[in-house]
């Protein structure tokens, strides 16, 4: 019991249910259901919850247990249901009871709501911005945003089944309540009137509603396609086009061959969905590797200082890719001055500054067909929920600031 | 080194003991075993065994 803590970050009120679920590795919905049913059976749930709020300290429990899955989860759910049923029957036998017409429908509604809640959480699709190419440093191919159905059909089918059972339980609760209160006949008349109204309104408004739904679907698809195109364009700009530019400038056949081989390896890895050869897994080494690449390609020193570190995810990979592009621009147009890179990683945000001491430039004056700043830096950051700012550095030259706020 | 107790067997044994206790009380007379009494006891026993089994997987 020493590791039982209230989990306020995942809780709805004081985190008592979430903490118990976290400690014992059961679904929080089951624990909440138990408290709701105990409340319905005579108000004991409220008292127990308040007692837990007072007695259990808040904080992160270090000994988190893994949630059971598959048959284990079914057994835990059934077992918890039977335990709750025994509590209800005991309260009923002792006379601590509101009414059969209230408690049993409430139990059915709570059970159905828990199942519907779990089902909706399981089939929620991934957000659109996460499906694109993370960036040049990531070297991954474009992945078509696949719904959960095609990735984990069994899991989705189970979630749909749970939702179906949940809906059936809620409907059964409604019928049970109406039957117990003698209002079933009146409800049937109202239900028929409601169905007739819905059918009439449906016939009238169906064309507009269908058109609206189709339009929303097409708009979403177009947005995803547009993001994918932008990511592919940014990747090709940062990798293939940069290499071709270097090849044109080089007089050394051996260097040209080496550049071509490296680009080929990167491109093959990207097309196959593999990490690029030597790709780092954390921010600091990834930034240092990008700086080393820029140094090798352009012969300009790049000084990197990283405060803090974190693992790479698609958004952080995008920051590294944008920083790499900023370093490349600074090396190419910064008057051969040293490029300074400063990255600061805090729990709240990741900030990367890339500075040079060159003549500077006006971002608004960049031609529309030049994609380096517009797509590879600004667009890439925005697609991954961050932002980029390009301005004159205090000591002259250009400063690119990349900011990625952490999700709360 | 001593192995820890088998939680599944422990819970199942306790549940059977509880059921046996109830049946014994019924036989001796202190309680009158009706459906209202046996239903919650049986549900609790089955529920405890299932929960212990599920958590032990």
Image (tube, coloured by chain):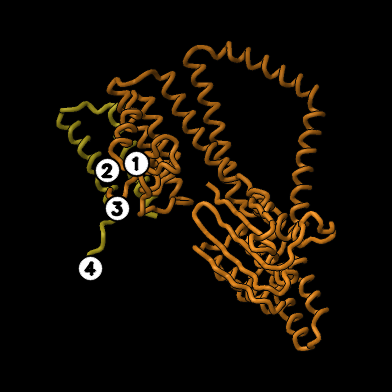
Chain colours: A orange, B yellow
Q: Are marks 1 and 4 on the same chain?
A: yes
The mark found on residue B1 in the picture is 4
- A326 shown above or below A183: below
Dot 1 or dot 2: first in sequence order is 2
Q: CA distance from mark 3 to mark 4?
A: 18 Å
Dot 1 or dot 4: first in sequence order is 4
- Nearer the observer: mark 2 or 3; the answer is 3
Q: Which of the 4 image quadrants contains residue B39?
A: top left
Q: CA distance from mark 2 to mark 3?
A: 12 Å
Dot 3 or dot 1: first in sequence order is 3
Question: Residue drawn at (50%, 12%), measured in percent from left and top?
Answer: A182
Which residue is label 2 attached to?
A: B15
Q: Residues within 10 Å of mark 3 (few under 14, many from 20)?
A: some
Which residue is label 3 attached to?
A: B7
The mark found on residue B23 in the picture is none
Which residue is label 1 attached to?
A: B46
Question: Residue drawn at (57%, 12%), measured in percent from left and top?
Answer: A185
- Which is nearer the eye, A360 or A211? A360
- A405 shown above or below B42: below
Secondary element at tag 4? loop
Q: CA distance from mark 3 to mark 1?
A: 14 Å
Secondary element at tag 3? helix
In the rendered structure, the residue with mark 3 lies on which chain? B
């Amino acid at each position: 019991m020493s590791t039982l803590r209230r989990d306020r970050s995942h809780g709805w009120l004081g985190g008592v249910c979430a903490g118990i679920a976290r400690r014992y590795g059961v679904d929080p919905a089951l624990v909440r259901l138990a408290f709701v049913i105990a409340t319905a059976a005579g108000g004991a749930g409220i008292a127990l919850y308040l007692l837990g709020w007072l007695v259990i300290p808040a904080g992160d429990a270090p000994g988190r247990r893994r949630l059971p899955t598959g048959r284990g989860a079914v057994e835990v759910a059934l077992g918890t249901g039977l335990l709750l049923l025994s509590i209800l029957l005991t309260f009923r036998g002792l006379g601590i009871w509101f009414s059969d017409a209230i408690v049993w429908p409430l139990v059915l509604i709570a059970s159905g709501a828990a199942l519907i809640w779990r089902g909706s959480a399981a089939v929620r699709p991934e957000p659109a911005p996460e499906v694109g190419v993370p960036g040049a440093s990531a070297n991954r191919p474009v992945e078509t945003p696949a719904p959960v159905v095609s990735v984990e059909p069994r899991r989705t089918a189970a979630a749909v089944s749970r939702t179906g059972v949940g809906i059936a339980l809620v409907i059964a609760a409604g019928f049970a309540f109406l039957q117990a209160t003698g209002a079933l006949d009146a409800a049937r008349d109202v239900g028929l009137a409601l169905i007739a109204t819905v059918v009439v309104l449906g016939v009238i408004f169906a064309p507009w509603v269908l058109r609206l739904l189709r339009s929303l679907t097409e708009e979403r698809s177009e947005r995803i396609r547009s993001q994918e195109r932008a990511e592919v364009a940014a990747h090709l700009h940062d990798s293939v086009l940069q290499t071709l530019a270097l090849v044109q400038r080089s007089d050394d056949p051996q260097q040209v061959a080496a550049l071509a081989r490296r680009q080929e390896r990167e491109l093959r890895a990207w097309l196959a969905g593999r990490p690029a050869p030597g790709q780092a897994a954390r921010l600091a080494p990834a930034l240092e590797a990008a700086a080393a690449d820029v140094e090798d390609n352009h012969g300009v020193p790049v000084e990197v200082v990283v405060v803090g570190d974190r693992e790479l995810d698609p958004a952080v990979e995008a920051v590294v890719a944008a920083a790499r592009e900023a370093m490349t621009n600074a090396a190419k147009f910064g008057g051969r001055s040293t490029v300074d890179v400063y990255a600061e990683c805090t729990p709240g945000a990741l900030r990367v500054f890339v500075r040079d001491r060159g003549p500077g430039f006006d971002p608004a004056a960049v031609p529309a067909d030049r994609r380096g700043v517009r797509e590879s830096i600004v667009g890439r950051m925005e697609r991954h929920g961050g932002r980029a700012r390009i301005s004159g550095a205090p000591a002259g030259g250009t400063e690119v600031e990349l900011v990625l706020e952490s999700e709360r | 080194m001593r192995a820890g107790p088998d939680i599944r067997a422990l819970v199942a044994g306790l549940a059977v003991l509880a059921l046996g206790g109830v049946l014994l009380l019924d036989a001796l007379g202190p309680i009158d075993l009706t459906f209202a009494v046996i239903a919650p006891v049986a549900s609790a026993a089955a529920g405890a065994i299932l929960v212990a089994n599920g958590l032990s997987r």
